Amino acid sequence: MSDRTQTTGVPAGGSAPGHHDPHEHEHHEHDHGDDTAHGHDHEGHHHHDHSHGHGRTDHSHAHHGHTHHKGLKGWLFELFVPHTHDAADSVDDALEASAQGIRALKVSLFMLLGTTVLQFLVVLVSGSVALLADTIHNFSDALTAVPLWVAFILGRRAATRRYTYGFGRAEDLAGLFIVAVVALSAVLAAWQSVDRLIHPQVLQNLGWVMGAGLIGFAGNEAVAIYRIRIGRRIGSAALVADGVHARMDGFTSLAVVLGAGGVMLGFPLADPIVGLLISAAIIILLWGTVRSIGRRLMDGIEPELVDRARHALEATPGVVDVKRVQLRWVGHRLQGAATIAVDAEASLRQAEQTLHEAGHRLRHALPKLDEMVVTPTAAGTHTS
């Protein structure tokens, strides 16, 4: 063992079809803090030459104890509370996560478009630029679902010879597009507000304006709750950022209500001033989204995830030391590499068993892990 180094890939979440541990694990008694299933694939362990026949498409959901409601109640339940799988389900986590992300985008897209149409109708009869700014922003927010939708679909494609790591980065690129669209909407809203300050106009139907603002708040908050919940569940920074963005849109809709109230109290410039404040708030809050997406593109990772991976490896029987742990997000999935030291006198079979157990522990510590390349070295040797 001292004169050789093995490298093994440890796929997680079912990314490699059709290969399971020779033993089954039941995990109903503890929670791993995630709604995704834990696959038990071991593509890198070539010494197993048998297959259990669980591919990506032959998994049945008929016996998992899910409650399926019928009628309108069932439709609403499935729309806003997509069913999840417990840890014993051997499904492809990446595909399941992408499907949930796409569902969230579909739902939020139509909700925001409906909100935007209602608000725009009120803009036509009232002339409120604050409401116009909010309407433009809501429309841009609805449109941001489209590139993210495309990114989720691309992310489900298999890796190719040119894109050997797959297409998960499309999700982060979509995040950059979202940032650009939101920034453009802020500039457009500010321009409309400045124009109204220079050329003031009398607002009409202030009650309708306030009602439209409340509709905007309700619609955006519903979208925010749904996007953030699904984004956190599947680990998508872009979807979470889009949800936070929708929540901020909701509060800007409340600002429209305040502007209309100011006009009703005899302060006609309240409407364009609120429009400018909305634009400024958008730009300020956009910085948080830029940081989140930028960190992903620079392969930034939450330190606690690295700690969890390191602790999982250190707790593995046969591991003498953990010399290196690297993780990065690719879309809403994790990839990484680690170097561990094992006993220099260990046999090849013992080293393989250690790698097998290390991969098992890593998948439980990091449910969103797709692949972890673990390289064993003999204890006492120097690695760079």
Image: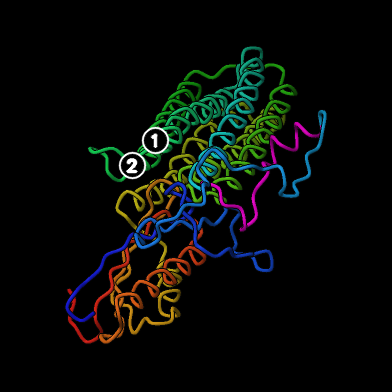
Q: Position of residue 186 (x, y in %)?
A: 45, 32
Q: In this view, which residue lies farthest toward the front?
A: 50
Q: Is residue 126 above or below residue 294?
A: above
Query: In the image, is 245 to the left or to the right of 287?
Result: right
Label 1 to label 2: alpha-carbon separation: 7 Å
Disc assigned to residue 166: 2
Image position of 175 with respect to 309: above or below: above
> Within 10 Å of the Cα at label 2, are there few (<14), some (14-19), or many (20+) other Cα atoms?
some
**Label 1 element class:** loop
Task: Name the residue at 54% across, 45% down.
Answer: 244
Say whether residue 88 is magenta. Answer: yes
The percent position of residue 58, horizontal first and vertical second, equals 56, 40
Q: Is residue 367 left or right of residue 71?
A: left
Q: Nearer the viewer, residue 273 or 300?
A: 300
1 or 2: tag closer to the N-terminus:
1
Q: Which mark is residue 218?
A: none
Identify the amino acid type marked 1: Arg
Magenta stretch: helix, strand or loop mostly: loop
Residue drawn 38% across and 55% down?
43
Q: Is residue 208 left or right of residue 196?
A: right
In the picture of the structure, the residue carrying the numbered disc 1 is 157
Quadrant where the N terminus is found in the figure? bottom left
The residue nearer to you, when weighing 198 against 251, is 251
Residue 119 versus residue 165 in the image, above or below? above
Amino acid type, residue under disc 2 in the picture: Gly
The segment highlighted magenta reads: 73-92
**Image location (x, y in percent) of residue 148:** 45, 34
SS at mark 2 in the image: loop
Query: Circle 1: is it few (<14), some (14-19), or many (20+) Cα within 10 Å?
Result: few
Q: Position of residue 256 (x, y in %)?
A: 63, 32
Which quarter of the image is occupied by the C terminus?
bottom left
Discs 1, 2 touching: Cβ within 8 Å: yes
